Amino acid sequence: MTLATEIDGNGNGSSPEKLLAPVLSAFWDQPESWTLETYRRHDGYEGLRKALAMTPDDLIAYVKDSGLRGRGGAGFPTGMKWQFIPQGDGKPHYLVVNADESEPGTCKDIPLLFANPHSLIEGIVIACYAIRSSHAFIYLRGEVVPVLRRLHEAVREAYEAGFLGKDVLGSGLDLELTVHAGAGAYICGEETALLDSLEGRRGQPRLRPPFPAVAGLYACPTVVNNVESIASVPAILNRGKDWFKSMGSEKSPGFTLYSLSGHVTSPGQYEAPLGITLRQLLDMSGGMRKGHRLKFWTPGGSSTPMFTDEHLDVPLDYEGVGAAGSMLGTKALQCFDETTCVVRAVTRWTEFYAHESCGKCTPCREGTYWLVQLLRDIEAGKGSMGDLDKLNDIADNINGKSFCALGDGAASPIFSSLKYFRDEYEQHITGNGCPFDPARSTAWADDSTEVNA
Amino acid sequence: MTDIQLGMPQLPAPDYPADVRARLEADGKEIVARYPDSRSALLPLLHLVQAEEGYVTRTGMAFCADLLELTTAEVTAVATFYSMYRRKPSGEYQVGVCTNTLCAVMGGDAIFEELKEHLAVGNNETTDDGKVTLEHIECNAACDFAPVVMVNWEFFDNQTPATAKRLVDDLRAGRPVEPTRGAPLCTYKETARILAGFPDERPGAVAATGGAGPASLAGLRLAKGETPGARVVHPRGEGRGGEGSRDEPQPGAQHLSSHDAPQQTSASDPAHPAGPAAEEGE
């Protein structure tokens, strides 16, 4: 099958205006979109005023009723996470925002924070009021200095305007916000590893229970939320939970950022109600690059089992993607066309997991190592047919048997690629090497032919 | 660099000169004050000592241990876990080419190979003039701008082998270089200071390169009824000389597994075949 490669106005299907729903990204095109002034011109900090007029318990119930689910990959209901924080326990409570966006393919939180950091800060103030926290942290991955700069500045502006600090807007809430830069470790995106890292230790996951809601940062009750989850809260407060629930499905309500990348005509951020399909996104944005067709894609980063062109009509919400055998994850839609070798792609992802394995548990540390050895041999044409079963077997011994989800993520591309592209693995073995020319996959591969056409 | 360490253990690291130590202590106390528990300051403190010397030295680690009342072993365990802490002297500019799957396929592998050849260095090596340290990096959350190159952790989006080579040539020649998203480049040490939590005070640094990048706006433009144009690419490249931003297909782009995930010996550090235990001897 082929996808539309020609743009024909808003021809078939619904128009982008109807299918997309920019909320967080609504004013990213405004001059100085990252400033407090621009944010306030676009209803910034209005949700906070409404939140502060409620009691904290009512606020938690309101966010829970909205149906907002975590945007970091797991989809856990945000309001429920807040509700788990024990109240009246005499301990400090903490909010930690997970801005350690590092899952391969995932690129939503970083552009969000670069263009609109105040949406996160407003969400943080609301969340801290709800869970009775007086100190919040943003754990930002270190490798994105332009974003760090804007967060520093946005936090400074928020303190100056009285949205942070003592007695926020006269509510009695005292709130400190600390921006903390990480130092390069994918595993710190795992929430308990992130907490260990924020405590100044190696980023290694903790055994659960106890869950962070009971014993998180400094063994105190802690909420860990993804950037996009928290940044979505102000709009829910300002425009109402019914407005939020009018988008998406009953179990997956609301809007979210879809990140289109790879061999597509227009890679980028597409904010839409949950449940849009890749076909709709490609149709509206110009499809795959000219003259090529979709071969495989990930619905939510490399840790979510890959899909093929059979899955173009899968609704991209938590239930839809789950029913089709994968996970919505971070909505990182990495699209690869027919020039791409799936063995090469999976080998590289597996090298990543091996590099980023924290070493704490044996199945992941050893398993990812051996997967890399086998995959490199297969890619180089030195594998045997028995290696394919061995790959499957090792992945099976990592999946569900490792300490945290990194191991499960490492197994996903192995299982799914063997399921859909076993032939291609076999070709590498019988043909003594890779049948693909990587030069044809590059972003500039077709430029000379375009000029001649 | 010793291959095997036998005999006497190393002597304790020398202290910083008194004036340096006093300055770092003042900064360090400011960092510690941000956290309810002092140990949380360790990651930013390691960025701070990296800002002083360009890499994390034994002296720097001893300083962190002293300030936080930890052992040097505890500090070393943390410093060696995270990939952003360098453990040897490196260049003024760290050029990182993303070779995770998506960027690699889109041309990151070809860019990395060309830069290695062009600069005559390998992964994690520095040019003779001390200007550029080349390394491949993992996914940097900019896949819609692939292939991506980072210099001192500022974004250089939609790169080609030609733009990347011009970039490193400019860096080595001392010509001003501006990222597609981020501020005009500062040195690696200055970058590390920002990472330690001290805001960039240069006028215009926060506002540099404007709002969201073009790809970030793709959906918003469609939703506003603007028809999509051709593939949206940053202006860098076109505006610089007459070469344009795209190249002919690269003949040297054959796939070489450039990644340094587990090799036969210790991970990512073939120069230290005995594994991490030998690394203290640098």
Image (cartoon, coloured by chain):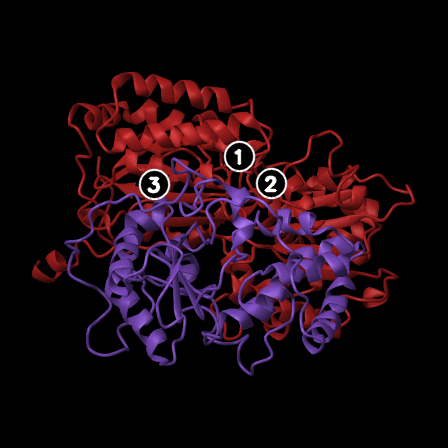
Residue type beneath disc 3: Arg
Who's the residue at 17% across and 43% down the image? A437
Chain for colour red: A
Whether discs 2 and 3 lie on one chain: the answer is yes
Q: Which residue is mark 2?
A: A190
Q: Which residue is mark 3?
A: A279
Chain letter of the residue beneath label 2 in the structure image: A
Label 2 and label 3: CA atoms lie apart by 31 Å
Who's the residue at 44% across and 23% down the image? A395
Residue A224: x and y in percent read 68, 45
Instruction: First in sequence, mark 1 or 3: give its number.
Output: 3
Helix, strand or loop under label 2: loop
On the picture, is B25 further left or further right than B84?
right
Q: Quadrant of the C terminus of chain A?
A: bottom left
In the orientation shown, which residue stands out farthest toward the left?
A: A452
Q: Quadrant of the N terminus of chain A?
A: top left
Residue A351 seen in this snapshot: yes
